Amino acid sequence: MNHLNRHVRSAAAALSVAALGAGVLAAHPASAEPSPALRTAKAAATTDSTPSKVAAAWLADELTNGLMVTNGRPDFGLTIDTGMALSTVSGYDSTVSAINTVLQPRIAEYVGNGTDESYAGALAKTATFVRAADQSPLDYNGINLVARLEERTANVPADSAAEPQAAAIAGRIFDKSASGNFANVVGQSYAVRALTVAGSPEAGAARDFLLKQQCASGAFRLNFAKADNPAQACADGVAGSEADPDATALAVINLIESGDRTPAVSAALTKAGDWLVARQRGSGAIRSAGTGAQINTNSTAVGGYALGLLQLRDSARKAAVWVRKNQPVDKYRCRTALTKDIGAVAYRPDRVKQSTTTGIKAEARDEWRRATAQAVLGLQFAPASKDKFRIESVRKQARAGERPQFRVYGLAPAENACVMVNGDFSRIKGKPSGDKIVRKLQMPTGNQRRYAVVYTSDEDARTSILVRN
């Protein structure tokens, strides 16, 4: 969908700034920071900063001169997704600013030239990113993104009774392009956010039209009805009104971030949250919609982020744990071909298995980037460990060849780690309960003190045991 210093393992941790990669342009630091809605939601939960931090570090390193590049061409949509994801992680202001510096002079390539081409969803999404980068959408490389978005938003007719069809589509966004109109509910939700935050007089109509796209079930559909259809509202069970979890989650996120607290919006958020909770599986995963629908980290992460902003903490936690399971951490003796890509999140579990021997192939890298951009959001609500991170030996000494037990404490739910001693190792994963993990390791030969070490993505702990031949 386009649609490491040792630290305290909590949301309050100070995070290191990742380098953008070779050739990135210097930029003045922005003052972007996580939104008030995110800060409020996270203040009510005990979260682990590690998975979002390492995902952000990997994602930032995938930028080429401040842009995401797909098939040799700049991918402006994915670049903006990346910038908005990084804006939710402390310590990435300069990275977001660098993206903005490179994106700004080329923005017409994404939003259109404003005459024969003008893309409403792109305008709205860009305006949202621009604010995250602490810039003004009213003058972005000479473009008033809000004014252009207003041009692409259908007006409310002066006499609704005389113009019923105009009234039916009031507030709806439209693209202007020789290629056709591709505006949809996701773009509409960004438009509501951008217009509301800007104080646009068209914000109310855009919001009302978005709320029409919510079905009685609580879900939002993805696509609008045809513009000449007098029935512009979602209707459960009718073709074209299929529930879409991604569209629902993004509608929730953008409505919350719009700051609109009207009763209609509050009611819509409650219904959408209930639907997302019902859609979520026991594992925490959320299944996508449409042809080839399947559980995946994109739908789960963006859905989990929406649930987190709604302060539905248990559901947000479950989603984050499932996403974290798809963030492989292979280090030291547990090394695989994915070791160099620590922090990346796979779209589905099978992608991890495929890549442990081959690494992330060039043709698959785009999918990992898109999955990780969404995962950064959902992982904001990953639960923290309930204990101090450490490893303890059950015995003080052992003979070479024996397999004494070691206990690992303080791994967060679904956190991947490697426990090892010279000659033997084991991959481990944090339990949902957060309880200790017990593993046996075979002692090497040699009369000396040996160290058993447990490595996570960003820290390690060790204990010693005396080995005798």
Image (tube, helix red, strand yellow):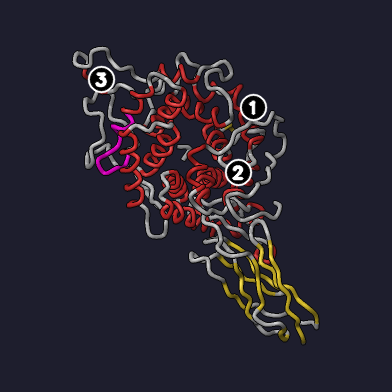
Compare marks 1 and 2 and give the one earlier in the sequence: 2
Q: Pointer 3 and pointer 1: residues touching (CB < 8 Å)?
A: no
Q: Pointer 1 and pointer 2: residues touching (CB < 8 Å)?
A: no
Q: Say whether residue 405 is magenta.
A: no
The label on residue 167 is 3
Vertical relation: 162 (above or below) 5: above
Where does the C terminus fall, quadrant-wise?
bottom right
Amino acid type shown at disc 2:
Leu
Amino acid type shown at disc 1:
Thr
Vertical relation: 339 (above or below) 203: below
Are there few (<14), some (14-19), or many (20+) residues within 10 Å of tag 2?
many
Q: CA distance from mark 2 to mark 3?
A: 44 Å
| Furthest residue in direction left, as rendered | 161
Q: Nearer the viewer, residue 120 or 319?
A: 319
Q: Which residue is mark 1?
A: 101
Q: Start and end of the magenta stretch?
A: 209-220
The label on residue 59 is 2
Q: Of helix, strand and loop, which one carries label 1? A: helix
Write the residue at 25% across / 20% down: 167
Q: Of helix, strand and loop, which one carries label 3? A: helix
Amino acid type shown at disc 3:
Ala
Write the residue at 51% across / 47% down: 43
Asked which quadrant contains residue 160, the reply is: top left
Compare marks 2 and 3 and give the one earlier in the sequence: 2
Vertical relation: 370 (above or below) 72: below
Give the side of residue 332 with respect to residue 149, left or right: right
Write the residue at 66% across / 67% down: 454
Compare marks 3 and 1 and give the one earlier in the sequence: 1
Q: Which of pointers 2 and 3 indicates the residue nearer the eye?
A: 3
